[in-house]
Image (tube, rainbow, N blue to C red):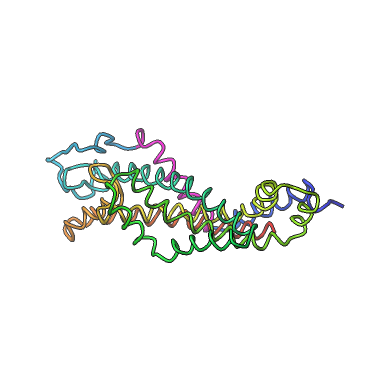
């Protein structure tokens, strides 16, 4: 028989996880959406028909043209192709999501690990700081931070990062509190393993399923938050293509210019839906593995 921790058991668990993910049509649909959006964003220079429409250039002969050839989604008030600008908006949104999560996740994970394992005053101080951030509505906190900063891409990422790490701290804290009482942790303490070893070699691997699931879900939410800031005029500024600012700009021409806001709004909905479906699929796959 195979031992519980043997490679054979690990492969079987991995196979169950893959089968659970692939067996869920919604998860596969979400993955397809995410793959298409990522490929469009990465190869935007080659797949967009008017890459020069990213900047302040204008074609006044094609101002506010409805969807028709050669502008499949229509043009904006300056005659720029909406499809091109949406694809480049995806690129900007994905970059922002990756940078925000690359900073917020490690910070939150370390805070949650230390607080959950050490306990006592360390736990009390770190988690009370976390609770202060969690008590403020995320969008309000981001708006407050951006109110003191120049509305740029970098400042927008910093504002969202400042409000995002506490969620990972709370998640990892809860998992760590439960894992700290498990036999493998007590065994490591008995043989004299260092705190760093216990945190990062023993407890952290058991936190990864929850962390990865949340990160996948959060990509869509970070994009939604960034778009909200841009919609309010606190995010990326024109002429840089941003989905939120495109929705806000198009709202000025409703209802006659319905396509100006509709397509960017649907683009936001699509990317959030895709990552949410993938995140739900990963959660079910990890549950099936266990």
* Nearest the eye: 63 or 212: 212
**Residue at screen point 12% across, 40% down:** 61
- Seen as rendered, the residue at the extreme front is 121
Q: Position of residue 34 (x, y in %)?
A: 46, 48
Locate residue 17, reporting x and y percent.
Answer: 65, 54
Give the image quarter of residue 178: bottom right
Horizontally, is 131 left or right of 17 in the view?
A: left
Q: Nearer the viewer, residue 71 or 253?
A: 253
In the rendered image, residue 283 lying in the magenta stretch gets the answer no
Give yes or no for residue 33 being in the magenta stretch: yes
Residue 228, given in percent of the width and then of the height, sits at 32, 57
Towards the viewer: 266 or 102: 102
Tell me the quarter of the image containing the C terminus: bottom right
- Image-based side of 86 in relation to 35, left or right: left
Image height of 138 relative to 193, above or below: below
Q: Residue at x 52, y 58 (%)?
A: 26
Side of 120 relative to 140 (left or right)? right
Quadrant of the rendered image containing residue 286:
bottom right
Magenta span: helix, strand or loop, mainly?
Answer: helix
Residue closest to the far bottom: 135
**Residue at horizontal 74 percent and vertical 60 percent from the top:** 182
Say whether residue 11 is left or right of residue 122. Answer: right
Marks counted in the figure total: 0
Q: Which residues are magenta?
A: 26-47
Residue at 24% over, 53% down:
233
Q: Position of residue 118 (x, y in %)?
A: 64, 57
């Amino acid at each position: 028989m195979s031992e519980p921790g043997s490679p054979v058991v690990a492969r079987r668990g991995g196979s169950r996880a893959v089968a659970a993910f692939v067996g869920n049509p919604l998860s596969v649909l979400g993955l397809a959406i995410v793959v298409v959006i990522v490929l469009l964003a990465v190869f935007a220079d080659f797949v967009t028909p008017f890459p020069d429409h990213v900047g302040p250039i204008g074609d006044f002969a094609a101002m506010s043209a409805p969807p028709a050839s050669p502008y499949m989604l229509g043009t904006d008030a300056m005659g720029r192709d909406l499809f091109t600008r949406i694809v480049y908006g995806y690129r900007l949104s994905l970059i922002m999501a990756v940078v925000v999560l690359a900073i917020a996740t490690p910070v939150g994970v370390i805070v949650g690990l230390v607080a959950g394992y050490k306990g006592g005053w360390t736990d009390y101080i770190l988690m009370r700081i976390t609770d202060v951030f969690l008590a403020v509505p995320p969008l309000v906190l981001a708006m407050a931070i951006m109110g003191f900063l120049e509305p740029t891409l970098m400042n927008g990422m910093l504002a969202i990062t400042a409000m995002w790490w506490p969620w990972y701290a709370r998640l990892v804290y809860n998992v760590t509190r439960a894992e700290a009482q498990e036999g493998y942790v007590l065994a490591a303490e008995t043989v004299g393993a260092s705190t760093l070893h216990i945190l990062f070699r023993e407890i952290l691997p058991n936190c990864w399923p929850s962390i990865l699931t949340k990160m996948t879900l959060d990509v869509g939410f970070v994009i939604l938050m960034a778009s909200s800031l841009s919609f309010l005029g606190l995010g990326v500024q024109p002429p840089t293509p941003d989905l939120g600012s495109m929705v806000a700009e198009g709202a000025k021409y409703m209802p006659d210019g319905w396509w100006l806001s509709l397509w960017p709004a649907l683009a936001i909905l699509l990317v959030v839906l895709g990552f949410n479906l993938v995140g739900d699929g990963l959660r079910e796959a990890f549950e099936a593995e266990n």
